[in-house]
Image (tube, coloured by chain):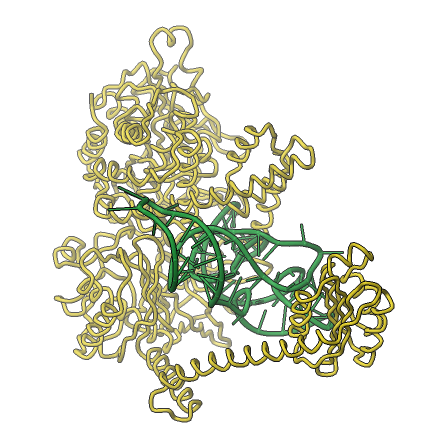
Amino acid sequence: MLTANEIRQQFLDFFRSKGHHIVPSAPIVVKNDPTLLFTNAGMNQFKDYFLGNREPEYTRVADTQKCLRVSGKHNDLEEVGVDTYHHTMFEMLGNWSFGDYFKEEAIAWSWELLTSVYGIAKDRLYVTVFQGDAAENLPKDEEAYNFWKQHIAEDRILMGNKKDNFWEMGDTGPCGPCSEIHVDCRPDEERKQTDGATLVNADHPQVIEIWNNVFMQFNRLKDRSLQPLPAMHVDTGMGLERLVRVLQGKTSNYDTDLFSGTIAAIEKLTHKEYTYTDSKKDVAFRVLADHIRAISFTIADGQLPSNTGAGYVIRRILRRAVRYYYSYLDHKSPLLHHLVHVLARQFEHVFSELQQQVELVSRVVKEEEEAFLRTLDKGLKKIDEIITDTFKEQSKTINGRAAFELYDTYGFPIDLTRLIGLENGLQVDEAAFEHEMLQQKNRSRAATALDTDDWVVVKEGGATNFVGYEHTEAEASVLKYRRVKAKGKESYQIVLDTTPFYAESGGQVGDTGELIFPNESVQIVDTKKENDLIIHFAEVLPENISAPVLAKVDGEKRVSTAVHHSATHLLHAALREVLGKHVAQKGSLVNEEHLRFDFSHFSKVTDEEIARVEAIVNEKIRENIPVVIKSMLKDEAVALGAMALFGEKYGNVVRVVMMDPNYSIELCGGTHVGATGQLGFFKITSESAVAAGVRRIEAVSGIAAEHFINEKLQLISTIQTQLKNAKDPLKAIEKLQDEKAALEKHVESMEARQLVGIRNELLTKDEIINQVTFVGSIINVSSADALKKVCTDLKSHLNDHVIVLCANIDGKPFVAVGVADTVAAAKGLDAGKIIKEHIAPLIKGGGGGQKAIATAGGQDASKLQEVIDKVKSLL
RNA sequence: GGGGAAUUAGCUCAUUUGGUAGAGCGCUUGCAUGGCAUGCAAGAGGUGACCGGUUCGAUUCCGGUAUUCUCCA
C-alpha cells in the first residue's frame, strides 16, 4: 500500500515530467489580501497571475498547498469530525497553466495520473462537465466534453449546473467552467444495485469528488457581467486526504496514515480507544486529529492565537478541540500540545517549518489550552448561578439571553451549557439564543460594512513600477481608481503607473504624501498592498484624473521610518548574538515614531541582556556601516546566511539587506538608511510578553530617540527642581515618603486619642430617659468619618443606649445616630428610620444606614440642637 | 472595527434597592505540638484600577481612560 508521502511525491513527480516547475506551499496565513484571512485554495498564491497584476515566472507549475477552511460555502467548523471527510486544514495538490496549456492537456493528464500512475479502476470514475447557463448566456462546455470523450465512456460524463461546475474565486474576479472527477468507492455488490452515476454530487460518503479542473476564461465584474480574460488558465485542485483514502482503500480519511499516528497518540494520552463509530467519543478523536493540524501549521506560519482576525480563528479551532476532549474524552488538562511533536515528525520532510519550531508551537498551544480551561472554570461557576436562578423561577428552560451572555461574555460554549442543563433536567431556549447571536452578528456587520465599486480604468497599462527605493518623488499617471464606502465615509483608492509610495508591508507602515496634479493636490493618507497591487488611499478624487501627476512622499516621515526599519535589523542580529540563534522574528511594526519587534524566546529578557543588546546596536551605529541592498537568487541569499522568515512568501529572486555581511543579512522589502550612522542612537523603551514563548521589544532610534531621551532628562530636571535641587533625588523622595508615612501614623493616633477624649467626656453626660441611656451632643470633630467613629465607640461602652451626635464641619451639618439592639426591640426604634424620617428633613439633606447606626448630612447647620431635641422626644 | 464583562488585602474571591469594606490561603508575633497543608491566640496588610460627574454621603449609579477576559465581523 502506498503511503501518503509516496502518493504526494508521485503527484509532484508526474507533473514535473510534464514540464511543470514544483513550487513550495505558500504560507497558510495570507498577508496583503483584505478579502482572505487564510489560504483556502491552491490557486490563492497565483491570484495575481490570473488577475494580470503580475507576470508568472513559470507558465506550468505544480505543488501541494496547505489550505484552511473553517467557514463559508466550503466548510463549517461545527461539521468537522462529525463526518469522515471534511477538514479544517488540508493539502491541496494542484497543477497550473498560466496562459500555457488548456483543457485538452489538463484533461488528458489528470486521467493518465489517476488511472495509469495511481491505478484507480476506470469503471469507478465519473466526470462532470458544465452544462451551460441560460441566465448568464453561457453555452455548454463542448470542448471539455469532447476531450473527455477520448478517454472515458460517454455515459460516465455527466452534465453539471452552474453551482457545481462553474467556479468563481469570489464575488468578482477570474472564473470559468470546471470539470470534476468523482470516484465511486462502494463495494462491487452495492455498485451493481445502484448506478454510481446517480450518486455523483449527491453527498454520498463513498461517491466523492477528488479532483476539480477549472478552466479560467472570464472575469466577473461587480455588475455581475462576464468579460473574457486576455489569456486562458488552468487551475486544478485535488485534496490529498481524499486521494490517499481512495488509494489506501479506506472508508474514512481518518483511517489513512495521514491521521492514524495522531489518533494513536490520543489513545495513549487519554487511555481511550478509537472505535470508528459516530459516537461522541469517536467524533472527539477525529476533531482532535483534524484540529491539531490546523493549529500547528498556522502557528508555525507565524500566526499566534489572538482575539481578532486570523488569530481568533485559530483560537476558536483550538477551543473546539478542548471542548471535545473535555466533554467526551473525559480529559480535563492540556492535551493538544503533546500532539505537536507527532505531527512535526510526520511532516518533517514536507513542511519542515513545524519541526523547526516545534518547541515554540507546542508551548503556545499549551498556554492557550490552559487559558481556555481557566475560562471554562469561570463559566462553570456562572452557569451554577444561572441554574439556581432558573430553579428559583420554577422554570424548566434556561433563558436564551442568559445562555448567550454566558457564551458572549464568558466564552462558555453553548453545547456545554446544553449538556450541563440536561444534567440538571433543563432545556435551553435555543431560539432566543440564536436571536441574540443574530443581533450580535448584525451589529458587527453594520460596523464594518464595506462597499467597493469596480475599478475605473483611466489608462491601460500593466503592473505599477515601484521607484520608492531610489526616489521619494516621481512623475506618473493614474492607471485606475475606485470608490470605497465604509461607515458612511467615502474614500478613493488610486493606482499609478509609477510610484515612490511604499505600501505597508513587512511591518513597515505605508507612506503618506500627496499627488500633485496641474491645478490641485490630493493628500495620500495611506498606502497599502492588495497582493502585488500598490494602492494609494485618498479622501477626495482629483478632478482631472487623467492629467500627469507628481507623486510626492512625505520625506521626513519616510526617513524616520527607514531609521526604525534599519534599527530593527540591527536589533534582530543583536538579539541573536545575546540570547541565541533560536530568536526568530514573530512580528514587527515599524513607523516614524518607534519600532516594535516580537520574537521567539522563552524567558524574560533581563535588564543586563537588554543593556548588552543596546550596547551592540549602538556600537554598530557608531561603526557607520554602509547598508548594502542587492537582488539575488533566493538560494544564493540563503547560502550567504540570510535570515528568511517563517510564514513569508518569497519569490525566486529576493531583495537582500546587508549591514556588515558578518553581522546582519536579511531578506527584506522595506526601505532603509544609507549607512547605520544615520540612526544616531538606539534605545529600548520596553520589554514584555505577547504569548507563550514570544517576547516583545519596543525601541526608538534617530530623532525619535533624541526626543525620548530629552523628555526623560527634562522630567528628571523638573523633579530635581521640585526637590529643591537635592543632590540625590532618589534619596530625597525616599525620605519624603518615610516622613509622610510617619506623619500619617502620628495624625491618626492623635485623632484617635482626641476621639477617645471626646468619647470619655460624653460618657459623663449620659442621662436616663424612660430606661434608655441617652447621649445627645454637638461635638467638634474634623470629618464625618470621625463623627461616626465616636458614635461606634460610644455604643460599645453603653447598654440600652440611644445616641445622637452632631457636628458642624465646614458649615455643613452631619449627624450620627446609634440605637442599641435592646432599645430597638423594646421601643421599635430604628436608627435608619430616625435619620430618614426625622433628621434628614430638618437639616435639608438625606441619610440612612442600619437599625443600629445611621448617618446623615445636609445643608442647614443651624438646626443641630433641634435634631437632638427631636430624637430625645422620641423616647 | 463593533458589542459584553472584569479590575476590592501578597494570592483566590465575597459584600443588593448608595450609609461602619470582609473571608480563606499566605505573612508577622506569642503559646501549644515528635508527623508531612499541625492547633490556639493576637496582629500587620486597602487611594476598592485611574480620572471626572450625580449625591449630604459613591466600592456600589452615570461618563471617560487604561489593562485583562470574551463574543462577533
Q: Which chain is yellow?
A: A
Quarter occupied by the N terminus of chain A: top left
To which quarter of the image does residue A630 belong?
A: bottom left
Q: Residue at horizontal 85%, vertical 76%?
A: A866
**Residue A653 against residue A163 in the figure, above or below:** below
Which residue: 65% across, 69% down?
A793
Q: How many marks?
A: 0
Residue A451 can be seen in this image = no
- Answer whether residue A781 is visible to the viewer in this image: yes
Q: Quadrant of the C terminus of chain A?
A: bottom right
Q: Residue at left 23%, top 23%?
A: A118
Front residue of A76/A44: it is: A76
x and y percentages locating residue A289 in the rendered image: 33, 32
Horizontal side, residue A343 vs residue A873: left or right: left
**On screen, B57 above or below A45?**
below
Residue A711 pos. (x, y %):
39, 82
Q: Colour of chain B?
A: green
Indicate the position of residue A86 as horizontal and vertical percent values: 39, 30
Q: Is residue A612 left or right of residue A513?
A: left
